[in-house]
Image (cartoon, helix red, strand yellow):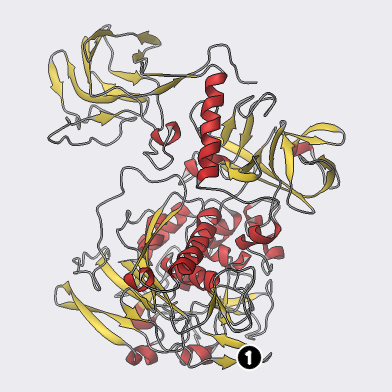
């Protein structure tokens, strides 16, 4: 929901103030009833507004240099990015006593986890979001009258230039994002001055504007309302708890709008357009009119507006001016958008996150997960194995469980990863020959990180199975991915390995031939997994750990072995120099005339060696000290170039150290003796010497 409605509604809230410094004051408003009491729809159903959102200022980040305020309502800002962030979206939930002490604790926590699982599966951005959950309250504030859910969010303020620069740098992973940034003017369309863009800390992390926070927001459900706790069967007199929670979580993620109230905007405000004909009944794909904001000439607060990511066609309508005038959320869909999580709650109906909903999050800077085969992958068909790019609609593919199915659609997209803001999200994962068993796969297989493979009756995205030996991610400059869609979601054979076909969950527009607006009003969502997926999707728990354990055993059976030998060496001028070891010190004799050398070693990712929640950095060797011709080089010395992680301070039980990533530059300036003191030993995979890529 929105943090501030138009100015005429600000009087309905309760105000808390905090000094911004320089004599300025910011007020965070807790809005009152968003749309009045329960309203009967034309069909006689009970329609309930989901609820308001309060947004909490953390600090000002304006280029003008406004000082940081004390946080309102006490959410705390941590320092810069943490040293280890999961390579996918992680939403950490904490529960207030209102939940843990309630009679519905188990149902509430189960519904919350279902909503979280949805977003963690739908979004592949490597972010860590922290949200607090309440029952009958959100962040300590009671749920507003007439609402079934509520949220509050923390944010920083930025200039238009800062916001645009961040979005342009981030929105590069799909056709929707490319179109969206193309609509943004290069200069501030609001006229600047005191105008600011308020960006929630969760979205700010996606845009690279801030690091991980200890609290990104709070979400609550109304304890006086009746809920169904699963989406498979919503009782006639109950609201969909999972859909309501998904609604509120999306607001913490940044799906909020200000509409220029008080000179404040959010990123979503830049994608609100009227229809070209000015009507309220235009269908998705109709022509867009103009940006619907106060800074646009001819702006009319009574005009109906729609979400448009490309500025040329509209999608869903935002809530009506009449409802907004009554306190409804300017960022939610109109009641005419049925059974949609980002609109109104309707008793007896599941509230699903749809394609357009995910496009909103995509535009705001979140990368949508896409399961794809890399070009060259051979798919089993009725006429033999065929490269995925050579398939055609109508070709008959072989199903892993037996039988066949015709190809319905083939999607493709080429990615230039040299300029990708988060290449790790989309670098291909190599599944080496025989990794899962003899002939599974029959030769090396390249998949996108979110492509699920079929293991013991469940589907597991391959990124969760990385082990550094037989399943590993590869850095490439470019990759072309292909989707294979059948009449139904199924397990097919890729290089002999059972893996999923395409299931459209809102990311079709990410492909070059996805058809743009063709799927904008689809009635399915990520929750389609619960109804149409051919097998359960697993990203945690005993089934995942069993699969990871088996793959480690299998790697050993194939001849891979764990070693503590990092195999350190220096590479420079076409030469490889081996050290003389003296205890924990490596001594390298250097030939004359070398300016820079590279310290090369084996490397590993701790999370791939055992605990999936451990450090996700690629680590080479841990260095405690360096000297060049007897002169001490500090661990933070500028002579240490690319390939070094940040220095880590020591404590009472350990010395300071700095990890390499396996290939680290050292400027030696013609020195003749380089000494490297090791801080510790680590565990690395030693590849089976007889195995080669197939």
Q: Position of residue 427 (x, y in %)?
A: 53, 38
**Image-quadrant location for residue 160:** bottom left
- Between 646 and 433, the one nearer to me in the picture: 433
Residue toward you, 469 or 302: 469
The outermost residue toward the front is 103
Question: Is residue 671 in view?
Answer: no
Question: Which sits in the foreground, 687 or 409?
Answer: 687
Q: Quadrant of residue 442?
A: top right
The residue closer to the viewer here, 449 or 234, is 234
Q: Residue at x 39, y 73 (%)?
A: 102
Q: Is residue 179 above or below residue 51?
A: above
- Residue 551's x, y, as percent? 55, 30
Q: For the residue labelled by badge 1, is the local secondary structure a helix, a strand or a loop?
A: loop
All told, the count of numbered labels is 1
Q: Is residue 674 left or right of residue 463?
A: left
Q: Which residue is mark 1?
A: 41
Q: Within 10 angstroms of label 1, few (less than 14), some, or many (20 or more) residues?
A: few
Whole-percent x and y of residue 452? 62, 44
Does 19 sit left or right of 287 as displayed? left
Image: 494 above or below 559: below
Tell me: 252 left or right of 276.
left
The vertical placement of 456 against 286, above or below, is above
If the image is split into quadrants, where does the N terminus sit?
A: bottom left
Q: Residue at coordinates 51% horizontally, 66% vertically from top-left?
A: 111
Pinpoint residue 433: horizontal percent, then vertical percent. Answer: 64, 24
Residue 677 shows in the view: yes
State the quadrant of the C terminus.
top right
């Amino acid at each position: 929901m929105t943090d501030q409605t138009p100015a005429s509604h600000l009087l309905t809230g309760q105000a808390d103030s905090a000094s911004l410094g320089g004599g300025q004051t910011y007020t965070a408003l807790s809005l009152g009833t968003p749309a009045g009491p329960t309203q009967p729809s034309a069909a006689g159903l009970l329609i309930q507004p989901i609820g308001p959102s309060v947004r909490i200022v953390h600090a000002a980040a304006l280029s003008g240099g406004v000082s940081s305020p004390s946080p309102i309502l006490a959410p705390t800002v941590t320092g810069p990015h943490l040293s280890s962030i999961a390579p996918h979206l992680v939403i950490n939930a904490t529960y207030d006593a209102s939940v843990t002490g309630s009679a519905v604790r188990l149902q509430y926590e189960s519904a919350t986890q279902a909503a979280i699982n949805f977003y963690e599966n739908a979004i592949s951005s490597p972010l860590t979001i922290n949200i607090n959950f309440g029952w009958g309250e959100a962040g300590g504030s009671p749920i507003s009258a007439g609402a079934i859910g509520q949220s509050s969010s923390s944010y920083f303020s930025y200039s238009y230039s800062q916001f645009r620069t961040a979005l342009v740098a981030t929105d590069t992973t799909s056709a929707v994002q490319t179109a969206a940034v193309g609509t943004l003017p290069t200069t501030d369309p609001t006229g600047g001055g005191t105008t600011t863009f308020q960006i929630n800390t969760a979205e700010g992390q996606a845009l690279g504007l801030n690091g991980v926070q200890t609290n990104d927001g709070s979400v609550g459900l109304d304890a006086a309302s009746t809920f169904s706790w699963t989406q498979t069967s919503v009782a006639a007199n109950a609201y969909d708890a999972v859909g309501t929670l998904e609604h509120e979580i999306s607001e913490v993620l940044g799906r909020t709008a200000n509409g220029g109230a008080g000179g404040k905007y959010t990123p979503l405000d830049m994608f609100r357009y009227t229809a070209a004909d000015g009507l309220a009944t235009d269908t998705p794909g109709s022509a867009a009119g103009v940006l619907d904001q106060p800074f646009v000439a001819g702006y009319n607060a009574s005009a109906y507006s729609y979400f448009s990511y490309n500025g040329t066609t509209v999608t869903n309508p935002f809530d009506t001016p009449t409802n907004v005038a009554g306190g409804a959320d300017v960022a939610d869909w109109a009641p005419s958008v049925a059974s949609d999580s980002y609109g109104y709650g309707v008793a007896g109906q599941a509230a699903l996150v749809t394609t357009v909903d995910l496009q909103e999050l995509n535009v705001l800077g979140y990368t949508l997960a896409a399961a794809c085969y890399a070009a060259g992958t051979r798919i089993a068909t009725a006429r033999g194995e065929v490269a995925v790019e050579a398939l055609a609609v109508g070709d008959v593919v072989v199903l892993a469980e037996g039988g066949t199915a015709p190809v319905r659609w083939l999607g493709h997209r080429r990615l230039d990863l040299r300029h990708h803001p988060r290449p790790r999200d989309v670098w291909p994962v190599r599944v080496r020959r025989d990794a899962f068993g003899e002939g599974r796969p029959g030769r090396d297989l390249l998949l996108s990180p979110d492509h699920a493979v079929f293991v013991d009756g469940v589907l597991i995205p391959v990124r969760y199975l990385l082990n550094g030996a037989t399943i590993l991610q590869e850095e490439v400059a470019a990759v072309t991915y292909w989707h294979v869609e059948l009449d139904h979601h199924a397990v097919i054979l890729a290089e002999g390995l059972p893996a999923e076909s395409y299931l459209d969950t809102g990311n079709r527009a990410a492909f070059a031939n996805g058809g743009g607006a063709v799927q904008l009003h689809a009635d399915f969502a990520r929750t389609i997994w619960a109804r149409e997926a051919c097998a359960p999707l697993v990203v945690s728990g005993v089934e995942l750990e069993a699969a990871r354990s088996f793959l480690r055993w299998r790697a050993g059976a194939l001849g891979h072995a764990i070693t503590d030998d990092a195999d350190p060496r220096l590479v420079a001028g076409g030469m490889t120099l081996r050290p003389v070891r003296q205890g924990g010190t490596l001594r390298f004799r250097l030939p004359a005339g070398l300016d820079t050398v590279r310290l090369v070693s084996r490397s590993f990712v701790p999370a791939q060696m055992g605990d999936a929640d451990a450090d996700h950095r690629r680590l080479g060797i841990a260095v405690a000290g360096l000297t060049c011709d007897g002169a001490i080089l500090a661990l933070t010395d500028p002579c240490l170039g690319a390939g070094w992680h940040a220095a880590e301070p020591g404590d009472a039980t350990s010395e300071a150290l700095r990890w390499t990533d396996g290939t680290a530059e050292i400027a030696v300036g013609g020195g003749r003796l380089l000494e490297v003191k090791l801080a510790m030993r680590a565990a690395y995979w030693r590849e089976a010497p007889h195995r080669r890529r197939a």
